[in-house]
Image: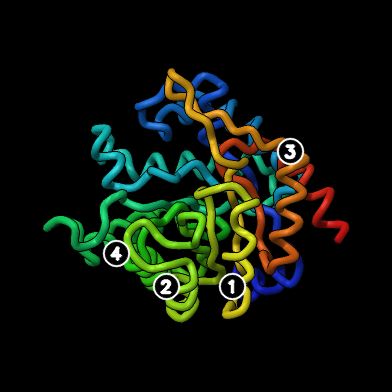
Amino acid sequence: MTKKEFRKLAEDIIILDGATGSNLMKAGMPRGICTEQWILENEQTLIELQRAYVEAGSQIVCAPTFGANCRNLAAHGLRDKLADMNKRLVDISLRATEGRAYVAGDMSTGGVAIGSSPDATYEEAFERYAEQITHLVNAGADLLLAETMISIDETVAAVEAAKEICDLPILCSMTVEADGSLYFGGSALEALETLQEVGASAVGINCSVGPDQLEAVIAEMKKIARVPVIAKPNAGMPKITEKGEALYSMTPEDFGKHMERLVEAGAGIVGGCCGTTPEYIREMCSRILSV
């Protein structure tokens, strides 16, 4: 997908997919393992989930490459498998979608704020993203998504790396508090201003909280946005059980109703994060695509 093609697609509301991790855990994925390795060993589970998202209306699905970067894979003793894993994980999504949806090469934070330790530098972040992006592009990803990002500087590194490696659109999505503040300084508004300036094709929010808590933040972002605004929230705020499991109480109907309000507030690219399923995406589509 070219950036021009993405801008054309964004003339209408773009539908993303919903959660991956919480659905894989429902399907039996244990906690504390390398998610990417488990998917490669249980690929049919992901294929069925992503096909369900496409059937529900998703136009873009995320390849399960969220943690397939050198820092995360090294923690699992899989650093030398980085190229192979990114290729195979993208291929699973390409087979799942069968050309009926675009596949985003998914990336996320390294989990450490730039400047918080000697090895947490802008240069390290840039090289980490550049390496993964190279493999995502070679694997055939249609576009790139840096999501659940926790700081502006690290997200800038992802955008700059993408610009050096390829000409694919890169979408950037921050995780924030309910008031729009970032976990490592700054706000969603400041992130939007910076990231659209350095070349992000879309900027917004994912994970964080439920859609009912984001209307004001999305509305303020829309006022200054020159690129589409992303809203991909959780299915409400979770309750944590004694076993450490997260239970999300927002129904698909409630989620769809609140996502409709986020579109009215200015969101142009929408989907779901933790706790959502294909039914949430289907309900969301039935509301916002008829607006």
Q: Nearer the viewer, mark 3 or mark 4?
A: 3
> What residue is disc 3 on?
252
Extreme residue in the right direction: 290
Q: Nearer the viewer, mark 3 or mark 1?
A: 1
Q: Earlier in the sequence, mark 4 or mark 2?
A: 4
Which amino acid does the dot numbered 3 rest on?
Pro
**Residues tagged 3 and 2 counted as in contact (Cβ below 8 A):** no
Left or right: 127, with 87 as reference point: left
Q: Quadrant of residue 97?
A: top right
> What residue is disc 1 on?
220
| Residue at point 53%, 58% (across, down) | 205
> What residue is disc 2 on?
163
Which amino acid does the dot numbered 2 rest on?
Lys
Label 1, label 2: how many angstroms apart (C-alpha)? 27 Å
Q: Earlier in the sequence, mark 3 or mark 2?
A: 2
Q: Earlier in the sequence, mark 3 or mark 4?
A: 4
Label 3, label 4: how many angstroms apart (C-alpha)? 38 Å
Residue 126's disc number: 4
Work out which quarter of the rendered image holds the N terminus and state it: bottom right
Counting from the top left corner in percent of width and height, residue 48 is at 66, 30
Q: Earlier in the sequence, mark 4 or mark 1?
A: 4
Which amino acid does the dot numbered 4 rest on?
Phe
Which amino acid does the dot numbered 1 rest on?
Glu
Label 4, label 1: how many angstroms apart (C-alpha)? 29 Å
Q: Nearer the viewer, mark 4 or mark 1?
A: 1
Counting from the top left corner in percent of width and height, residue 119 is at 15, 56
Between residue 27 and residue 275, name the one nearer to us. Answer: 275
Sort mark 4 into few (<14), some (14-19) or many (20+) by Cα contacts within 10 Å: some
